[in-house]
Image (cartoon, rainbow, N blue to C red):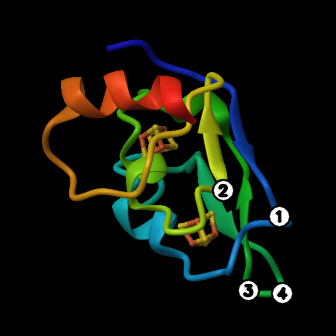
Amino acid sequence: MERGARVELDAGRCVACLECLEVCPRSSGISRPVFRVSGEGRPEVAHPESCIFCLDCTVRCRAVAIRVNGRRLPPAPLGDRILLLKLSSMY
Ligand code: SF4
Ligand code: SF4
């Protein structure tokens, strides 16, 4: 699994549910989290170099507001990554 990615967050789509922070395995319990909460209570990308490209944030985001290395997956239960990666070509 590669480490470090281009993580883009579309603030115009984001509804500030903060579920990306909950699901990201690299945004809690480490010193350089990918996501952090801004002073306005919104997510922001802090350390994309910590990303492990699991794509869980893109799958969880209900607003389809996150791209990781250009990939944005449809909201879905976490699980079948191969199917989701195939579906990603639609987004
Ligand atoms: S999961 Fe999506 S909508 Fe929710 S805070 Fe993160 S980017 Fe915004
Ligand atoms: S792809 Fe995985 S590690 Fe990277 S920001 Fe999203 S949830 Fe975190």
Distance, label 4 to label 3, CA atoms, is: 4 Å
- Quadrant showing the C terminus: top right
Q: In which quarter of the image is ligand 1?
A: bottom right
Which x, y percent locates residue 68? 59, 32
Q: Which residue is drawn at 72% across and 51% down?
A: 45
C-alpha distance separating marks 1 and 3? 12 Å
Taking the image as shown, residue 6 lies to the left or right of residue 2, namely right
The residues bearing labels 4 and 2 have C-alpha atoms spaced at a distance of: 18 Å
Q: Which of marks 1 and 3 is nearer the N terminus?
A: 1
For mark 4, what is the residue? 40
Residue underneath mark 3: 41
Q: Where is residue 29 in the image (x, y as percent from the top left)?
A: 38, 59
- Residue 14, image quadrant: bottom right
Residues at circles 4 and 3 in contact by the CB criterion of under 8 Å: yes
Q: Do the residues labelled 4 and 2 touch (CB within 8 Å)?
A: no
Q: Which residue is drawn at 73% across and 86% down?
A: 41
Tag in front: 4 or 2? 2
Q: Which of marks 1 and 4 is in front?
A: 1
Q: Is residue 88 above or below residue 47?
A: above
User: Amino acid type of disc 2?
Assistant: Ala
Residue 50 or 6: which is nearer the viewer?
Answer: 6
Whether pointer 1 and pointer 2 mark residues with C-beta atoms closer than 8 Å, the reply is yes
Q: What residue does disc 1 label?
A: 11
